[in-house]
Image (tube, helix red, strand yellow):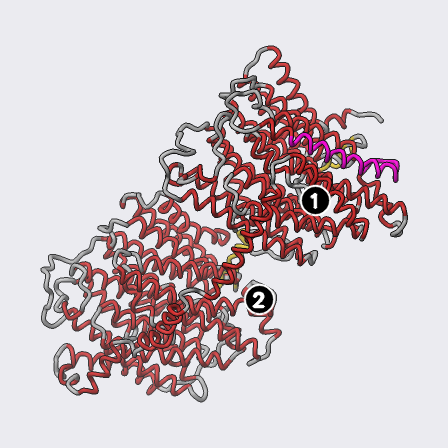
Amino acid sequence: MLELIWLLPTFPLLGFLALVLTGGTLPKQIAGPIGAGSIGLSFAVAALIAMEFIGSGEDYFVYEAWTWMSVGSFSPGFTFYLDGLSTVMMLVITGVGFLIHLYATGYMADDPSFARFFSYMNLFVAAMLMLVLGDNLVLLYLGWEGVGLCSYLLIGFWYTNPANGYAARKAFVVTRIGDTSMAIGLFLLFAQLGTLNIQDLMHAAEGEWEVGSGYAVAAALLLLGGAVGKSAQLPLQTWLPDAMAGPTPISALIHAATMVTAGVYLIARTHILFELAPSVQLLVAWIGLATLLISGFTAMTQSDIKRVLAYSTVSQIGYMFLGLGVGAWSASVFHLMTHAFFKALLFLASGTVILSLHHEQNIFKMGALRKVLPVSFASFLIGSLALTAFPFTSGYFSKDEILLGALAVEGVGTWLWLGGLIGAFFTGIYTFRLFFIVFFGESNVKHHVDKEVGGWHMNGPLIILMILALVGGFIHVPVEAVFSHGEAHDEHHVSGLIHGIMIAVPLIGIGISYLFFMSKTFSVEKLMASGMAQSLHKFWLGGWGFDTLYNTLFVNPFLFLARINRKDLIDRFYALIVALSQAANGMIVRTQTGSLRWYALTLVAGLVFIVTLGALL
Amino acid sequence: MTITAADIYLLLPLLLVTGTVVVAMTAIGIKRDYTSAAIITITGLLLSAIAAAVLMPGTNQQVTPLLIIDQYSLFFTVVTCASAMFIAILSYPYLLALDDNREEYYLLLGVASVGAVVMVSSNHFVSAILGLETMSMSLYGMVAYTVHSKSAAQHPLEASVKYLVLSAAASGILLFGMALVYAQTGTLAFSSLIDLSDSSPGDLGNGFTVLALLMITAGIGFKLSLAPFHIWTPDVYEGSPLPATTYLATIGKVAMFVILLRFMEASEALAFEGILTVLSLIAVASILAGNLLALMQENLKRLLAYSSIAHMGYILIAIIASYYAEGRIGIEAVTFYLLAYLIMSLGTFGVASMVSDSSKEYDSVDDYKGLFWRQPVLAAIFTAMMLSLAGIPLTVGFIGKFYLFFAGVEGALWMLLAAMVIGSGIGLYYYLRVIYRMLEPAPESGAFNRSEQTASAFAVVSVLFVLLLVLGVYPAPVIDLIEAISAYI
C-alpha cells in the first residue's frame, strides 16, 4: 500500500492535464467531477497510506518512484519520503483540499472559466504534495515554485480586472524575494554538504557543523528568508491581504490552509539546521511574535470580511513561527493542522456570505444575518471560537501548547509568552468584532437576500469542517519520531494559575468585543473621537504602513532607476554580442560560394593544414 | 577461413536487408508497382531491425575478420534499420507524383542501408570502406533521383555532382591513409596501429603513422561534414530531394560516427598529441562555423545542414573526452547523443517532407509562418524537435547535451566546453526563430495549406515525437542499455 504514494500527486496532475489539454472547454458536469474527484482519490489513497504507515510503527518510509537520469554521480530522482510530518501535511492537503474543491464546485458554478479554475487548483495540489513528500531539495524546490506559480495564477484568476492582476504580481514578486533567498540557501547546503537528500543533509550538517557555526547560521537565515516569504511573515507579509483578490475557495485552500504554511513545513523539515543556529531559531520566534501582534492590530480595523481573515491568517502563522522558534516543533505542526480546519471553515463560510449577498465583502454593509444565513452563522460561530482558542475547541489545544512551549524557554520565554498572550487577547477582539457586526445588530444589507446559497456540495464541507474545528484538538499528531531528539520533553510543571490566565485572556477579548459591538455599552465612535486614535486607526488600517514604506524604499527608487536607465547600459554589452555574431556570420557565409572548384580547394587546403599542424606537433 | 552456420545466423540482419533489395528488384522486374516496392522495402527493414534486436542479448563475436557482431553493432543495426524504415515511409508520399520511374528509389535506399549496416558492424578498414562506398554510391543516386523530372523541386544534378566529386576525393584521402597504415603494419584491422603508438617521436615510423591517422581523420571528417571539410554540406542538402537529404543527414552521419568511434578506441590514435590537437581544433571549428553559418539562414534545409555541422562538433568533444575521462562515459555520451540526434533530425526532416513532394518543397523558414494556427499538432511536434535540437530540458536533446557536457567535465576539456556553451547559445537563436515564425499570423498561402496528409507519415513523426519526450523525461532505461553496450567498444 505504501508503494502507492506516487499516486498522490499523480491524480491531481492527471486531473490538471485532462482539464488543460481539453482547452478548458469541458462542461461543468464533467470538469467538476474531474477536478474534485482527483483530489478525492488522492485523499482516499492518503488516508489508507497514513493508516498503514502509522500502524506499521516505522519512523519513516522511502519510496523511489524513478530516477530522471543517472549520469555519473548526478542522479536526481523522484523519491518520496514519508514520516509523521509529511503524513500530517499530506492528510491536511488532500483532506481539507478535497473539501474545498467540493465546495468550489458549487461556489464557482456560474463562472465561465470553471474548467480553468479547477485545472489550476489541481496543479496546485499536485505541486503542494510534491513539496511535502519529496525527499530531496530538487523536488522540494519544484513543489515550492509550483505552488507559487499556481498562487499567482489563482490570485489573478479574474484577470479582466487590472487590480487582480496587480495583486497577483505583488504576491509573486514579494514571495520571489524569499524564494531567491531560499534557493541560495539550498545551493549553499548542496555546495557545503554535497548531497541533495534532505535527511542526509541534516545528518551531515549535524556531523560537520558546530552549534552556532557560520555556515549553519547562514544556511538557516537563507532558508528562513524563503519561509517568511511563502508564509507571509514580517517583513514579507504585505502580499497576503492583497491576495484576497482571488476567488474565496482559493483564499481558503492556498492562502489559509496549505501553501502559506509551507514556510512552517520548511523550518520543521530542516529543524536540525535551525537547532545548529540557535540565534536564528530565536529570531524565528521574534519574527512570529512581531507578526502576530502587528497583524492582530491590523485585523481589528479592517472592514473587508476577507481581509480580516487574511490578517488573522498572518497572525496565526505568526503563532506557528513562535512555536518553531521556541522549539515546540510538534505544537507548531499541530497548530498548522487545526488552523487549516478552522480557517478553511471561516473562509468557506465567508464565501457563502459573500455569494449570498451578491459579492458584498464590506462587513458594515451586512449585519443581522444570523437568521438569514444559518449555516454561515453556525460555521462562523464554531470557526471563531476555535480561532480564539475557546476551551476544548481545536485551536485551544494547539495554541495552548505553543504558549506553554514559549514559557518553557529560559530567559526571554516569559516575554514571548506574554506577547503571545496579548496576541490571543486581540484575536478574541477582532474575531468577535467580525462575528457580531456580520451576524447581529442592525441589518445594513442593501440588496434583498432571498436565501442562503448552498446545496450539499457547499454545506457538506462546511459541516465536516465544523466538526473538525470543534474536535480536531483531540487528533494526535504523529510527529514524535520526527522531532525526537530536538524537543524538550520534560514536562514543565505549570501552575493552574497560568492555565487559568491562558483560558481567560481570549475570553476577556471576546467580552470586550461584546461590549463594543454587541451590547454597545462602549462606543467605537467615542473611542475614535480623539485625533490620536484616528491616526492610529489609519496606521493600522494601512497594515502599519508597510506598503508605503516599501513603495518609498524599493518600488519608487527602482522605477526611478528604470526610467533613467531606459537605454539599458547592460544591454549594450549584449548588443555587442549580437553585432559580433552577425559580423562573424557575414564573414563566414562568404565561404559558401556554391562553386565546386572552391569547395575542392578548401578540402585540399584543410587537409594540408591539419597534416602540417599534426606533423609540427 | 570458413563461415559456419552460426556465423550466418549472426549475419541475419545484414542478409535480410540484402535480401530485401533482391526481392524488391525481382518484384520490379516482374511488374512495376510503386506501392509494392515500398511495402517490400519497409517490411524487410522492419524484419532486419527485429532480427537484430532479437540477436542482441549476449552476442559478442567476430564474424570473419571484417565484421564484428556485438551488442553495440547490433544496437546500431536496429537503429539504422528502423531509421531507414522511417525514411522509406516518409519517402512514399514524396515520390508518389513523380513523372519518372519511381520504384528504383527503394532499391537505392535498400542498398544504402546494406552499406550502413556493414559500417556499424565494422572494425576493419576493408569493411569500413566497402560499407561506406556502398552507402555513398547509393546516395549519389538518391540525391540525383529526380534529375529527369521536368518539375523537380530542387537542383538534384548540381547537388549530386558536387557530392560525387568531393566525396570521391575524400574517399581517396581516406584510402591513402589506410594504405599508409597497411605499409606500416601489414594488416588492415582497426587495432593494428595499437603497437605503433608507443614508438618514439621523431621516428620515421611515427611520422608515417601520424600522417596516416591525419589523412583518415580528414577523410572521415569530410563524410561527417566537420569543419574545415564542411563546405559541401548545405549545397548538397538543399539540392537533394528531401528524403535523400534526410538519409544523408541521419543514417549517413551516424554510421560514419560509429566507425570513427570504433577506430579511435581500437587504435588508441588519441594517444598521439597531434591527433588530439587536430581533433580539438576540428571540434571547436565545427561548432563555431556551423552555428555562425546557421545564424541568419532563411532556408530550412541549409539551416539544418549547418546545425548538423555543429552537432557533429559537439559529439566530437565526447570522443576526445573518452581519452581523458575515467571509465566509458565518453563512449556512452557519444552513443546517447547519436541516438538523440537521429530522433531529432528524422523528426524535423519528417515534418518538412510531410508537406513537400517531388514537385514542390517547402524549405524556406517563411513557409512555416503561422503554422500554429493552421496545424497545431504538427506545429507542436516541430516545436518540440526544434527545442530538442537547441537542448531544452525534458527533451532528448537536453539529456544528450547534458551527457556530452558531463563527459567533457570528466575529461576537464574546458576550452571545448566553452565552445559548446557559446555554440548552444548561438544555436538557441536560430532554432527559436523558426518557432517564432510559426507563431506569427498565418498568411493566405504557404505550406500546410493542404489538409490531406498521409497517415503513415504522420504516424512516423508522432512516434519520433513520443520518443523525444519519453527519452527526455525518463531516459533511465535507455541509459542503462547504452551503459551495457558501451562496454563492447
- Indicate left or right for A259 with B255 as reference: left
- Residue B325 x %, y %: 72, 54
Q: Which residues are magenta?
A: B162-189
Residue at image coords 60%, 70%: A192
Q: Which residue carries the number 1 mark?
A: B486
- Residue B485 x %, y %: 69, 42
- Indicate left or right for B116 with A559 as reference: right
Q: Which residue carries the number 2 mark?
A: A190
The answer for which chain carries disc 2 is A
The amino acid pointed to by label 1 is: Ser
Q: Is there CB contact under 8 Å for labels 2 and 1? A: no
The amino acid pointed to by label 2 is: Phe
Residue at image coords 44%, 89%: A411
Q: CA distance from mark 2 to mark 1?
A: 31 Å
Residue B258 visible somewhere in the drawing: no
Which type of secondary structure does the marked residue at label 1 adopt?
helix
- Residue A40 x %, y %: 36, 52
Residue sitting at the far top: B30
Is B166 covered by the magenta stretch?
A: yes
Which type of secondary structure does the marked residue at label 2 adopt?
helix
